[in-house]
Image (cartoon, rainbow, N blue to C red):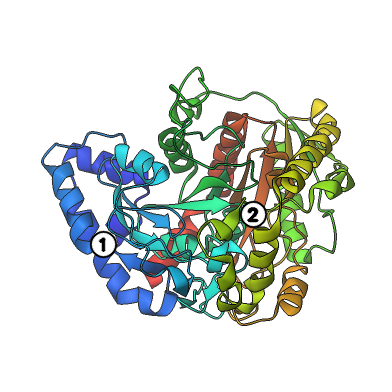
Amino acid sequence: MSEIIELDAVGAAAAIRRGDLSAVELAHAHLDRIESLDATLRSFVAVDRDGAVRAAEAVDRGEVAGPLAGATFSIKDVEDVAGLPTTHSCDLLVHDVAAHDGPVAGRFRAAGLVILGKSNTPEFCTSLTTSRLNGVCRNPWDTALTPGGSSGGAAAGLAAGLCSAAHGTDGAGSVRVPAAYCGLVGLKPSRGLVTFGPLEGPAYFQTSVPGVLTRSVRDAAALLDALAPPGRWTPTRPRPFLDELTREPGPLRIAITVTPPAGGVDPECERATLAAGRVLESLGHHVVEATPAWEELAPANGLPMSAPGPTALLDPADADRVEPRNAGMVRRMSSMTLFEHARLVEATRVATRRFMPFWDGIDVLVTPSTGLMAPPAEWAMWDLDLETHNTRLGAFPALARPFNITGQPALSVPIGWSSTGLPIGVQLAGRHLEESTLLHLAAQLEVAAAWADRLHAMTASL
């Protein structure tokens, strides 16, 4: 059973195609594990056992032929999945049941993934993964710690072996931070890579994009192929991202920094990042220490992760009924004018143009993913007032958020380990639409660091 649980999505789908494993067997293994372990972790907020088994049966009958057919998957509870509520972890939205799959779930289902249910998130993605509605989500490496946010449920469930891979969204590091804390690969694509045409998708410019959390680099590539298939609405490319992993990238120009935009970096995160730089140098890449002009992005700090955000889902009169840490944000978003948003968007574009010349001389920037070791699970609880909440989150060195502002691709890889055996993520950031470069580099680090063994051991121990 442990061998089944530890399969990544590509491996699970291949085993099902060969007949070594049935999709129903895999679905039941993960569903039973959710029932056994998730009362403590609280990584799932809705489980569709009947729907998942029906989808797996269709795979076994040969009715589903996607490249990841039969692998199990979770969708973050901010996207619609037919028949399940989309609550954004807000108790005012518990009856908001989706009649149809949204475009994100539709893309993953088309790849053959079996959707088990919805993963936990803080209310409106604004913090670490705690909420009045769904309680405190916990890290399987140490349940006293947080798995991060806002895709903390996705990361906790995947690391614990409750599914093959997971969807997340990333507006300020919300895929990469949980990946770092849970020993996973977390990929945030370029803004503009994942598009759905004029009839679906976000209405306004935003920093948040859909991403993926995986147990392997090849899964990140395969899931990005599913999320952003080249075609009518998405950019074309010479070959699938998964196929790109077989090509040698050649020596790359890599900059490394442990200097964040503000605050300080934990010494263990710093050591892990510098060690990653030495590994990259040993692989033949040219590595230098250099820090981009973080201050160029300061004019864009007021841009919301999404617009109109939760005010598209709530009556503004209900602002005082959401969690205390979010009431001010709901009021602010409900009063933001189109003129103000447009000014912030233009400021973001200007700031990005000023920031990007750093990449004229390098291919990839390497930084800590978070710069802060995972804090206690109750460190940023849902009932904090806004000032206290913001002070807590202000302790994060915010090395992930700059690339949400600029829209560049970035991913976290679990190449580092603390003195107590906890995973430490290192971030790779590249130029717009150069996901292939990041995936190449991550695949090289995966071989050199062999992090999968530690993840498998932790998952098997639960």
Quarter of the image for residue 284 reads top right
The residue positioned 81% from the left and 53% from the top of the image is 258
Mark 2: few/some/many CA within 10 Å (<14, 14-19, 20+): many
* Position of residue 1 measured from the top left corner of the image (x, y, whole percent): 25, 62
Residue sitting farthest toward the top: 238
Q: Amino acid at mark 2?
A: Gly
Closer to us: mark 1 or mark 2? Answer: 1
Mark 1: few/some/many CA within 10 Å (<14, 14-19, 20+): some
Q: Which mark is residue 173?
A: 2
> Relative to the observer, which residue lies in front, 324 or 218?
324
Q: Does 101 sit left or right of 449 as displayed?
A: left
Badge 1 or badge 2: first in the primary sequence = 1
> Relative to the observer, which residue lies in front, 342 or 369?
342
Q: Secondary structure at mark 2?
A: loop
Q: Which mark is residue 37?
A: none
Residue sitting farthest toward the left: 61
> Relative to the observer, which residue lies in front, 285 or 153?
153
* Position of residue 176 measured from the top left corner of the image (x, y, whole percent): 60, 53
Q: Quadrant of the C terminus?
A: bottom left
The residue positioned 30% from the left and 62% from the top of the image is 2
User: From where the camera sits, is residue 248 visible?
Assistant: yes
User: From where the camera sits, is residue 22 visible?
Assistant: no
* Position of residue 398 measured from the top left corner of the image (x, y, whole percent): 75, 57
- Write down the residue under mark 1: 48
